[in-house]
Amino acid sequence: MKLYGHPMSTCTRKVLTTLAEKGHEAQFVLIDLGTGQQKSPDYVAKHPFGVVPYLEDDGFSMYESRAIIRYLDAKLPGNKLIPSDLPSLGRMEQWLSVEQSYFTPHCMAIVMEMLMKQMRGGGKPDMDKVNKGRDQAAKALDVVDRALRSQAYLAGDTFSLADISWLPYLQYLSVTPQGTLITERPFVKSWWQRISTRPSWKKVNG
Ligand SMILES: N[C@@H](CCC(=O)N[C@@H](CS)C(=O)NCC(=O)O)C(=O)O
């Protein structure tokens, strides 16, 4: 199995965390996002949208991180990361969708301005964008906080792909001044502590 990606990419990190949870090593092929390798003809021949990650497995290949993690859970032995009971499965899918639709775009607007822009020498953050992102991310985290009052993980009592899908975005948010979005919500805060201290995430996040 070969995983094409970049170790700092949130989407690659979801896949790496899933592999670590399953106790499986894939061969890692670095795609250098810094030099735009993801747009090179060789790579675009594999991934037509020119982004990472991309998976090759025994003659089969696919892209889209949230699809890849479902594939890996179904394929590999080890911890089951997709619940088998239907209500928990429904909840897992709901939170994967909430992450993608209502949280990540706003969280990444903050991260882009507060973290990435400065790392790339792009100057001062646009606080208008940061504050808009903060308001919207706060709404999503309020909803998560209410849900986590009565359960340890997003799908219920057990860790699932839904928790994995939130981890990389929460990680970057946590190291910005807007990381208080996590710590000022008690149930989000304890869930974050629970999921970010798992050996799989520690391995991926270094
Ligand atoms: N929906 C895609 C998004 C992939 C994506 O946007 N990857 C980013 C890194 S996290 C990327 O390759 N960015 C480089 C670019 O946009 O050129 C997935 O989940 O795999």
Image (cartoon, grey):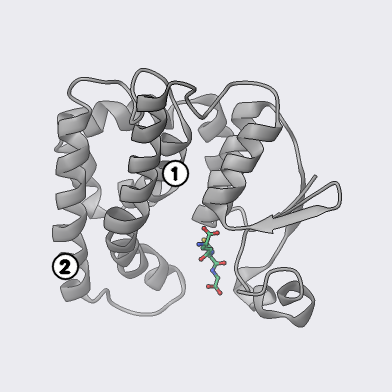
The kind of residue tagged 1 is Ser
Which residue occupies the foreground of this view, 54 or 90? 90
Can you say which quadrant of the picture contains the N terminus?
top right
Dot 2 crowding, Cα within 10 Å, few <14, some 14–19, many 20+: some
**Is residue 175 something that shows in the picture?**
no
Relative side of 149 to 159, left or right: left
Whether label 1 touches label 2, CB < 8 Å: no
Residue ID at (15%, 36%): 185
**SS state under label 2:** helix
**Is residue 114 something that shows in the picture?**
yes
Relative side of 187 to 27, left or right: left
Residue 107: quarter of image: bottom left
Q: CA distance from mark 1 to mark 2?
A: 22 Å
Residue ID at (24%, 32%): 189
The kind of residue tagged 2 is Lys
**SS state under label 1:** helix
Residue 52: quarter of image: bottom right
Residue ID at (47%, 25%): 83
Can you say which quadrant of the picture contains the C terminus?
top right
Which residue occupies the foreground of this view, 22 or 112? 22
Count of picture labels: 2
Q: Position of residue 105 (x, y in %)?
A: 32, 63
Q: Where does label 2 land, which residue?
A: 132
Q: Position of residue 47 (x, y in %)?
A: 68, 69
- The answer as to whether callout 2 falls within 8 Å of ligand 1 is no
Residue ID at (35%, 62%): 108
> Who comes first in sequence, dot 1 or dot 2?
2
Q: Where does label 1 land, which residue?
A: 165
Dot 1 crowding, Cα within 10 Å, few <14, some 14–19, many 20+: many
